[in-house]
Image (cartoon, rainbow, N blue to C red):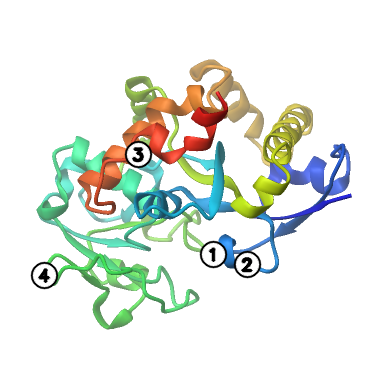
Amino acid sequence: MVTIRLAVRDWDYFTPLALGDIKPQGFALEVHRVGTLVGNLATSSDYDAAEISFSRYAQGRAKGESSLLALPHFLMRGFRQRCIITTAENPLVSLAQLKGKKIGVTGWQDSGNTWTRALLREAGVEIDDAYWFAGRLTADHPIVDRLNGFGRPGRIEVAPGERPMIELLQAGELDAVFTPFMPQGFFLKGSGLRQLQTDFRQAELEYFNRVGYIPGHHLLAFKSSFAETHPEIPQQLSELIEQSVKMWHDKREKYADTTPWLLDDLRRTAQDLPADWNANGFDANKKMITDFGKELFEQGITSQCLTAGDLFPSVLKGA
């Protein structure tokens, strides 16, 4: 029996799979929890499938790479309004006010930051309307290349002295920072930090009502060689993960006392969003995929404007 070695972030909805409440039929599954995404799944000797960056996958497709078979199954999706932070005393409260400002990013080509820049572009703030600095969020994060060739002197540069961006923000040397995860202590009273948009939840709901989706960031992908040898498994694993998500969601509604107001969040989500807000598959996500392809091109991350079919040719081939 074939065994799939799957590398994913520590998402709670994998719990039923990890504990064996849901079991695959016809293959074995090893769920490996990783702190960061696999650098290059195609050349990895440790994994057959993994959670991968939507942006990096798209860049590979734009270059004609076919070493990965990715499914339009979004293991991570999330709004980005919440991911723009500033200091508590900063008077900025809207995206349009970031025009001409200094903005820090944790990685230029990252899927999440691409979506966040799309928000600014919608608000009339183009890339050339701000000054960008890429760097580590805090001193606990490593110093690595976060520009990946996309830097432009005087416009998109490395954070000054590779200093942590939270430190630069607090010193007034940055006006805002884009980050997928909040720094430790962010939510404590007196942290001195806040989301740029004070009612980011309302901003996110209005965004959903405009575009009809929650942006996708990470995909489920297989090595193409593995998928060619076992063509039925990718879709089977996708469906298995969806079963795990459903089981976990149903249990979460029952065991909602892990935080005091989780139950209210579940209620508000059910009332404010359609039941299929996190549906996977090509048709359910075609608009979002198309919009992301356009943003990658408009922001200069890909040299061509990839269509949904360009990004997921195997889905159309099998249709």
Residue 292: x and y in percent read 35, 39
Q: Which residue is mark 4?
A: 154
Per the image, the residue denoted by label 2 is 44
Looking at the image, can residue 313 be seen? yes
The local secondary structure at tag 1 comes to loop
Q: CA distance from mark 2 to mark 4?
A: 37 Å
Left or right for 138, reference 9: left
Q: Position of residue 30 (x, y in %)?
A: 80, 54
Q: Position of residue 74 (x, y in %)?
A: 55, 39
x and y, in percent, of residue 201 in the image: 41, 33
Q: Residues within 10 Å of mark 4 (few under 14, many from 20)?
A: few
Q: Nearer the viewer, residue 252 or 87?
A: 252
Residue with the most extreme bottom position: 161
Q: Which residue is under mark 3?
A: 292
Q: Secondary structure at mark 2?
A: loop
Mark 3 residue type: Phe
Spatial CA span between label 1 and label 2: 6 Å
Specify the amino acid type for callout 1: Asn
Q: Earlier in the sequence, mark 3 or mark 2?
A: 2
Q: Earlier in the sequence, mark 3 or mark 1?
A: 1
Instruction: Give the left or right position of residue 297, taking residue 245 as reference.
Output: left
Task: Please name whichever residue, 315 or 137, is drawn nearer the observer in this view of the structure.
Answer: 315
Q: Secondary structure at mark 3?
A: helix
Distance between mark 3 and mark 2 Cα atoms: 27 Å
Circle 2 or circle 4, nearest the eye: 2
